[in-house]
Image (spheres, rainbow, N blue to C red):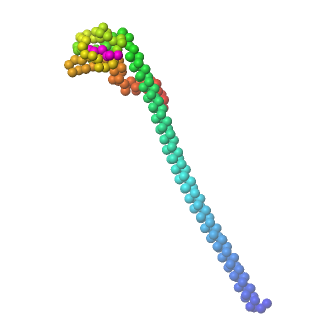
Amino acid sequence: MSGMDNVSLKVIEDARQVKGKNIQEAEDKAEGIISKAAKKIKNKTTLVKAAAEEHYSKTFDIEVFKVKSVLDQKVLLVKIEIVEDIIEKAKEKLYRLDRKGWEKFLKKMAEELNINKGNYIVGRKEKVLDKSIAAVIKGIKPDKKKADFDRGLKITEGRTEIILSPEKYLDRDIEDIKMEVALHLFDGEE
């Protein structure tokens, strides 16, 4: 082989080495780029996954709160209905007071309200309450006017007008009574 052939072979060999080195460098750079891209993708995926989990958690909590709120409102409405039913039953019992019950009630109210004079009218639907029971309040006299109300005993003195009836007495403190009944019925519930 001649010297030219040797030089050609040497150039080809050097070119192969440079080509191999260039290919290796390119593969290494490609691996680095792919590795960095994979790390970025992994980091982005982790961030997106965390954001999605947080969004899901918040959305879940909001939906649970909404459902719980609706259920709490329904439970509250049922409780209010129970209390209202109990109060209505108590009023029904009060409508059926006997003579002694009326006498006791009227004496107590006359004392509390300091009633010792005036005219009275008996409610048009009263079956037990009459003049003899009204007489337990000393100093009041029957009025000749017709009753314009259903239940109880209306006492007028000048411009003052009071209707004495157990249900009116109950209505006067109804909100406190409702709270008391609710506390007794639902005490300890969450």
Q: Quadrant of the N terminus?
A: bottom right
Q: Is residue 149 above or below residue 68?
A: above
Give the extent of the magenta segment: 120-125
Q: Is residue 117 magenta?
A: no
**Residue at coordinates 68% horizontally, 78% vertically from top-left?**
19
Q: Between 142 and 24, which is closer to the camera in this rendering?
A: 142
Residue at the spot 67% in from the left edge and 73% down from the top edge: 24
Q: Is residue 132 visible?
A: yes
Image position of 5 with respect to 114: above or below: below
- Picture coordinates of residue 39, whole percent (x, y): 59, 61
The part of the image, by quadrant, that contains residue 178 is top left
Q: Position of residue 103 (x, y in %)?
A: 33, 10
Residue at 70% over, 79% down: 17
Q: Position of residue 151 (x, y in %)?
A: 33, 18
Instruction: Tell me if 116 is positioned left or right of 68 in this view.
Output: left
Question: Which residue shows up at 39% across the image and 14% down it?
Answer: 96
**Furthest residue in direction front, as rendered:** 146
Q: Is residue 183 visible?
A: no
